[in-house]
Structure formats: C-alpha cells, structure tokens
Image (cartoon, coloured by chain):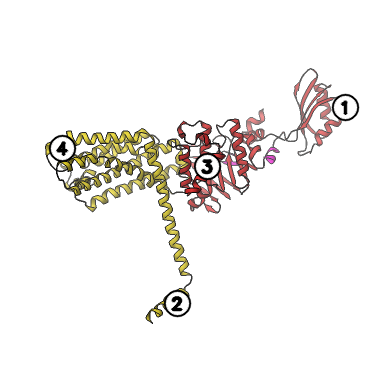
Chain colours: A red, B yellow
C-alpha cells in the first residue's frame, strides 16, 4: 500500500531525512522508532503529502503523493504530532467537518461520526468545545478524525503520547485490531509498544534507516539475546565463575549480585540461538548448587535501540 | 424521408467511431465531478470558518464597532443632516477605506496565522483538497462575514429613504464598491497572515500595506507627489490606490476597470498567499 523510495529532505544545510526506502503492505503495522530529531515526523509529513520531498518518491495505493496527491490523500488517515484540532469547535462539529471534507454526506456522515465517537470513547464530550478538553480527550478527538473515513492507510505520529496507561492500552488494541485490514505506520519512542502492536519495526537515526525487522529479529541483535540469568545458593561467586568458565558453551559470565549465600549471574553464550543449550549445560554442572532461578533472556529492545542509535555510550555501561 | 436520412447519417458517424461517445461522455463526467468536488470542498471550509468567527466574541465585537463607527461618522463627523442631500456618498462611504484599514486586517489576521500556530494547517493540507480550495474557502468565509457587517448598516439606507428620495441605484453601487474594496484589503491580510504565526504581526503588516493602498490616492499625498514627480508617475502611483478606484462606485459609476482592479488585486494576493504557503512547506 505504501511505497517509500529513496526519500530525502533537507532543511537548510541539515539533512533531516537521508535516503529512506521501505514499504508497508495491507495487514502490517509498522513501528517507526528513533530518538528525537531522527527524522520520524519529517518522513511522516512527506508520506502524507504535507511537505514535498527533495528527492525520492512516495506512492500510496499506487498514487504518487506529489503528482496525484488528491487520490493518494483520500486513502490516508493522518494523526499529526501533538494531535492538533480546531479549538473553536465542539468535538462533534470537528468530526462533522472532517467527515464532510472526506466527502461523507447525510446518513453516512452521521454514522461515521457516531462510529468513531464510540471507538474513541468520545460520547461524554460530544458537545464540549475542543479548547476545554483534557490532553487525552483532545488526542483521541484528533485520532477519531484520522479514522473517520475508514482509510486503507493510517499514519500516526506518536498516537499514545500524553495518554494515561488505560487509554494507551485502548489505543494500542485499537491499532492492533485495525492493523489486520489496513496498512499502518506509527511512530513512537516507547519500546514496549513495538512488542504490543507492531508486526515490523524500523529504527531510524540521523535520517537513515539503521535497523528493519520484526520485533523478534530486532531483539536478537541484542547482546543479551540467548544469555542466561542464574540465581543460586550454596556456592560463592569465584567458584561459580570458575565452573562456568570451563563450559564450552559459555563466552563469559558476569556476577550481577552477591549476597550472603546467594549469587546472581548472567552468562553469555558463545554461539547465538542456542535454543536453551546454554541453560541445559549450566544445569548439568550445577551439582551441589541450589538453583532458585534459571532462565534464557530473549534480548531487550531498549538495549538494541541504545546500541544502534548511541553506539558509544551503550558500550560503556 | 429527409429526417430518416439525417438520422441514418448521424447513426453512421457513431457507428463508424463508436469509441468517441463513451470518451466524450466520460470526460464530461470527470470534469463536472471534479468541479463539483472542488465546490463542495470550498463550501465545507467556508462553513467551518464562518462558524469559527461566530464561536468567539470577536465577530460580535467587530460588527458592533463597525456599526458604531459608521453611525458616528455618518451622522456626526460627516454631517449627514447638515449637508441636506439625499445621498450617502460624502457622509457614509467616504469613511469606509479608513474603517477597513483597521477592521479588515483584524478579521483576516487569524486566517492562516492561527492555523499555523495551533498546527491544524497540517491537518487541513493533508486532507484530500488542494491548497487553492483551502485558500478560497477561507477567503470567502471572511468576505461573507464582511458582507454581513456591511448589510447590517441598512438603517442608514432606511434613514435616507425616509427623509427623502435618493437614487438607490447609486447607493447599491456604493455598497458593491465597498464590499469589493473590503475584499481587496482582506486578500492582503491573507498574505500577511500566511507569512507569520503571530496574529499581531500579521495585523500590523497588513495595516501598513493597506495604508499604502489608501495613501497612494489620498489628496494631500497626491498634492505632495505633484510637487516633484511628473504627471505620468503620479498617475501611475495613484492607479494603485483603492481610493481612486472606489471613487467611481460612490458616484454610482460601475466602471469595469475599477471592478477589474479590485478583483485582480484579490486574485494576485491569493496567488501570493499560495506561493507563501508552498514556501513554508518546502522548508
């Protein structure tokens, strides 16, 4: 549905987006990650046709966003950053306007407005002015606007920003549900959302794509992927370290915590993707120890994120 | 006999070029559909903007101030009763270029500046509409609002009709000219509004530009210019003035050149607005 080819944009001397290419198909939810100022919002603004790219192209449903912008824009629902909305209107008035400009009239319009009101829990503020809404409600009002014409493509710039945990949960499950039938791009810097919602994630940094894959694939780039955490009693740290060092599967072991009788350690594997081989080999040499805990780490996205976007600081920790 | 031959001939053309008819029909349909869409979009935006005016007290304040000014200047400063003429030219319309100098920029200043400050411009311009439709829709809303303010001065017409029998054609002509002039000021305010996020900056800039449009035809300024510039240059400068072009309307002369002057000023200013908006987006 969305094809982005070699997209680039400069503001003055700064290259905000520097040759990005990817595509999103129907049924996919693409998470767009990156530190602040990485070029996420600029990319989304180019995809939705708000700013024209300097180089490259975007097609939505086969329509070029620059040359056939009206046809392309019809397919897109867009939630801009900070969820702007006309403050002088009521929620209902604002949604009516959004529906009308999307070409909905009469009965269809009323149905569409009622549908998004229900989906975004806005009934209680239906006749309230947007200006007086709390941030969460305003955010959902703008979100409602983006799905009012049941678009095939959704572009959401930080859709959960400023929401409380319950609202975050609601919006996430809404995105996941809609992602079954639509092509969705959403940006975030909350990494748990990637696991909760995305079928694929892209990490961008300084205008370039630095990682692209499913959440599982990304996690496996982590140093921790496949590492084993062990918590034992009946052995001291030095003995544990010596014993583990003899194993052929172990690269190195670090002691995380040493208490009076209990030792917690993290053991890193030599080969990735051991399918539990490391944990089994540790269990085999553990005679005389009392294992309280033994589990294989899946790898952590925040650590991957940090090591990719800030390679210097991540290593020193 | 003749009829059937003609019918056969026309059938023959269609038979020979059967592909022609669906194409011409299709083109026609697409064109009408597009222009209908454009009109519907403009109407939607105009409706929203008009509603926005009346959702804040600004609109009512504006109308009240305008009507008070009109009444005060017509009856007291303009000396409507003392002149003892069945006409609205001197006491009423003559003040309009000066009222509009402050009131129209106040009406137009929020059009784009507010949109940019709140960020809704990003919503508006990613909707399936063209920038032109947005510009025209917003302009029309403000222009209709100004028309409403102008129409509400009707007690003046009633008064002059009650007291005597004026030429109402001349008065209508004056109103048309006044509205066109307001449109020209408004289009200038559209430019300045698109230039900034701050409404106050937009207001001041557009007052300055509109002041130039007035002063270029203001008699004292013309006299000053005649002191050192050639008559051709003076003519050239005064031809930019709204006062020069509004003059004819006040006298009941509907000169196409004056109408074209105001309309071209509006079209040019709206075009400039679109260039500025495109410039912002291009970064």
- The answer to whether A91 is drawn above or below residue B170 in the figure is above
Q: Which label lies toward us, 1 or 4?
A: 4
In the rendered image, residue A134, in percent from the top left (x then y), is placed at 50, 30
For residue B218, side relative to residue A108 (left or right): left
Residue that badge 4 annotates: B80
* Label 3 to label 1: alpha-carbon separation: 66 Å
How many residues crowd mark 2 within 10 Å: few (<14), some (14–19), many (20+)? Answer: few
How many residues crowd mark 4 within 10 Å: few (<14), some (14–19), many (20+)? Answer: many
Residue that badge 1 annotates: A287
How many residues crowd mark 3 within 10 Å: few (<14), some (14–19), many (20+)? Answer: some
- The answer to whether B193 is drawn above or below residue A286 in the figure is below
* Label 2 to label 1: alpha-carbon separation: 101 Å
Residue at disc 4, secondary structure: helix
Q: Is residue A51 visible?
A: no
Residue located 45% across and 34% down the image: A129
Q: Residue furthest bottom?
A: B1
Residue that badge 2 annotates: B12
In the rendered image, residue B81, in percent from the top left (x then y), is placed at 14, 37
Residue located 19% across and 47% down the image: B168
Residue that badge 3 annotates: A114
User: Which quadrant holds the C terminus of chain A?
Assistant: top right
Q: Which residues are magenta?
A: A204-220
Residue at disc 2, secondary structure: helix
Callout 2: residue from which chain? B
In the rendered image, residue A287, in percent from the top left (x then y), is placed at 88, 27
For residue B140, side relative to residue A121 (left or right): left
In the rendered image, residue B65, in percent from the top left (x then y), is placed at 28, 33
Mark 3 / mark 1, whichever is N-terminal: 3
Residue at disc 1, secondary structure: loop
Residue at disc 3, secondary structure: helix
């Amino acid at each position: 549905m969305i094809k982005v080819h070699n997209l680039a944009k400069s503001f003055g001397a700064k290259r905000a987006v520097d040759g990005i290419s990817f595509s999103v198909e129907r049924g996919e939810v693409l998470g767009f990650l990156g530190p602040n100022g990485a070029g996420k919002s600029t990319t989304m603004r180019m995809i939705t046709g708000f700013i024209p790219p300097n180089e490259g192209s975007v097609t939505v449903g086969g329509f070029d966003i620059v040359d056939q912008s009206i046809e392309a824009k019809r397919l897109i629902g867009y939630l801009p950053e900070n969820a702007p909305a006309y403050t002088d209107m009521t929620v209902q008035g604002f949604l009516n306007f959004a529906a009308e400009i999307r070409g909905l009239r009469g009965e269809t319009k009323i149905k569409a407005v009622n549908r998004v009101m229900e989906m975004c829990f806005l009934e209680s503020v239906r006749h309230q002015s947007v200006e007086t809404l709390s941030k969460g409600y305003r955010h959902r009002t703008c979100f409602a606007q983006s799905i009012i014409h049941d678009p095939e493509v959704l572009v959401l710039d930080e859709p959960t920003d400023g929401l409380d945990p319950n609202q975050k949960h609601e919006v996430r499950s809404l995105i996941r549900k809609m992602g079954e039938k639509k092509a969705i791009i959403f940006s975030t810097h909350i990494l748990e959302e990637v696991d909760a919602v995305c079928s694929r994630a892209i990490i961008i940094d300084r205008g370039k794509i630095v990682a692209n894959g499913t959440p599982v694939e990304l996690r496996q780039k982590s140093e921790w992927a496949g590492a084993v955490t062990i918590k034992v009693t009946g052995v001291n740290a030095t003995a544990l370290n010596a014993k583990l060092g003899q194993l052929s599967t172990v690269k190195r072991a670090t002691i995380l915590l040493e208490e009076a009788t209990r030792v917690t350690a993290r053991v890193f594997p030599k080969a990735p993707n051991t399918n539990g081989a490391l944990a089994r080999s540790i269990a085999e040499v553990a005679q005389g120890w009392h294992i309280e805990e033994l589990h294989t780490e899946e790898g952590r996205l925040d650590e991957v994120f940090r090591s990719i976007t800030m390679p210097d600081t991540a290593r020193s920790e | 006999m003749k009829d059937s031959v003609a019918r056969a001939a026309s059938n023959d053309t269609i038979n020979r070029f059967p592909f022609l008819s669906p194409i011409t029909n299709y083109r026609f349909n697409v064109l009408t559909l597009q222009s209908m869409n454009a009109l519907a979009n403009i109407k939607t935006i105009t409706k929203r903007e008009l509603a926005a005016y009346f959702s804040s007290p600004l609109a009512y304040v504006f109308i009240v101030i305008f009507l008070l000014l009109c009444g005060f200047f017509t009856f007291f400063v303009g000396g409507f009763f003392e002149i003892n003429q069945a006409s609205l030219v001197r006491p009423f319309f003559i003040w309009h270029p000066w009222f509009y100098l402050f009131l129209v920029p106040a009406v137009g200043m929020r059009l784009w500046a507010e949109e940019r400050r709140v960020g809704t411009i990003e919503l508006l311009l990613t909707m399936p509409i063209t920038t032109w439709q947005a510009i025209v829709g917003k302009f029309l809303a403000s222009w209709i609002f100004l028309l409403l303010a102008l129409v509400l001065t009707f007690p003046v017409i009633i008064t002059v009709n009650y007291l005597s029998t004026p030429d109402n054609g001349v008065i209508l002509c004056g109103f048309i000219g006044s509205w066109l002039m307001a449109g020209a000021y408004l289009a200038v305010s559209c430019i300045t509004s698109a230039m900034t996020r701050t409404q106050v900056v937009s207001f001041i800039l557009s007052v300055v530009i509109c002041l130039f449009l007035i002063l270029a035809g203001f008699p004292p300024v013309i006299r000053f210019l005649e002191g050192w510039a050639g008559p051709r240059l003076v003519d050239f400068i005064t031809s930019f003035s709204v006062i020069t072009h509004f003059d004819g309307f006040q006298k009941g002369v509907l000169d196409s050149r004056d109408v074209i002057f105001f309309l071209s000023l509006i079209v040019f200013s709206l075009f400039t607005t679109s260039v500025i908006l495109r410039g912002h987006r291009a970064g």
